[in-house]
Image (cartoon, rainbow, N blue to C red):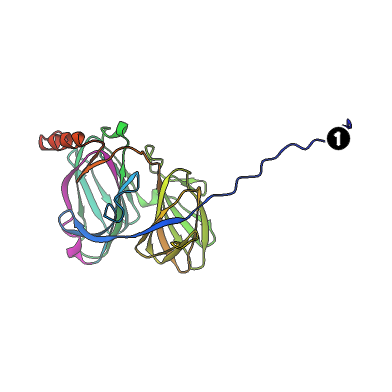
Amino acid sequence: MHANTAISPTVDAPAAASLRNVTRVVRGRPTSDGAGVKLTRVIGQPALDMLDPFLMLDEFRSDQASDYIAGFPEHPHRGFETVTYMLAGRMRHGDNQGNSGLLTAGSVQWMTAGRGILHSEMPEQEDGLMWGFQLWVNLPAKDKMTAPRYQDIAPERIPEIELATGVSARVIAGEAGGVKGPVEAEATAAVYLDLRLEAGAAVEVPLPQGHNAFAYVYAGHARIGDGPTSELLRGDLGVLGSGDTVRIAAPEATRLILVAGKPFNEPVAKYGPFVMNTQQQIVQAVEDFRAGRF
């Protein structure tokens, strides 16, 4: 080899994004909960019992007061988190520890039930549109008996950013476009985005590799990835396959929530408002609730 021969250093090309496609499409089922509140259950029904760590997703949407006015009187929870995201309306929450707060349009409440809490969620309106989501997020075995806590996030605390031309995101949890959401969700390292796409817009959104993820279209029509199940209409939930990026295109003005979380791969025992790892722990939860230990 000549002394003046240059040796080029090896440069690794950036890894190509691995795109997630929709592996299945699920439509919600009409049901009622609380004192008769009408809602649509999307996760937590026969077609999709759970998507670890997500246990339940409800959409409530009505401008008929009789569908929601009775609300959710005091009830217990143990072993998981509830996430309420309001799009329209006003809901007052209170609990047996003296906490109280008001959920308004654009606000989020991330409640960690932990070892046990009694709380209520009641409408603070007698007419008009009540619209939003409640998501149940599991806790790992090591955190199931943690102290209860609330994260009440006012609308102005949720950053809204432009991800691409004609695409904006409210970042509730996790990160998007270099912006972090206000919610702390360490157990699941959750991502929760509310995306708005103008007609004809498209975007690629990174999601953590290994997280389970879904997209739920609540207005318009989205095309996610490619393949036979890429088309999602209003009311469709798309379960996303593996990868680190999701590509979303909007043939018309569209809104959707994009949610991802780290799965625990632990046994799940469910009984109404209690979610533990074993049946024995469920029996204990019921006994503790009846004995007033929440």
Residue 192 included in the magenta stretch of the image? no
For the N terminus, the image quarter is top right
- x, y (%) of residue 216? 38, 58
Q: Is residue 227 above or below residue 55?
A: below
User: From this viewpoint, is residue 173 visible?
Assistant: no
- x, y (%) of residue 200? 51, 67
The residue under label 1 is 5
For the C terminus, the image quarter is top left
Q: Residue at x 25, y 32 (%)?
A: 145
Q: Residue at x 88, y 30 (%)?
A: 3
Q: Is residue 17 above or below residue 1?
A: below
- x, y (%) of residue 249? 49, 62
- x, y (%) of residue 106? 35, 55
Indicate left or right for 280 with 216 as reference: left
Q: Residue at x 63, y 45 (%)?
A: 14
Question: In the current view of this chain or complex, which residue is farthest to the left?
Answer: 291
The answer to which of 101 and 261 lies nearer the viewer is: 261
Which amino acid type is shown beneath numbered disc 1? Thr
User: From this viewpoint, is residue 34 visible?
Assistant: yes
Residue 65 included in the magenta stretch of the image? yes
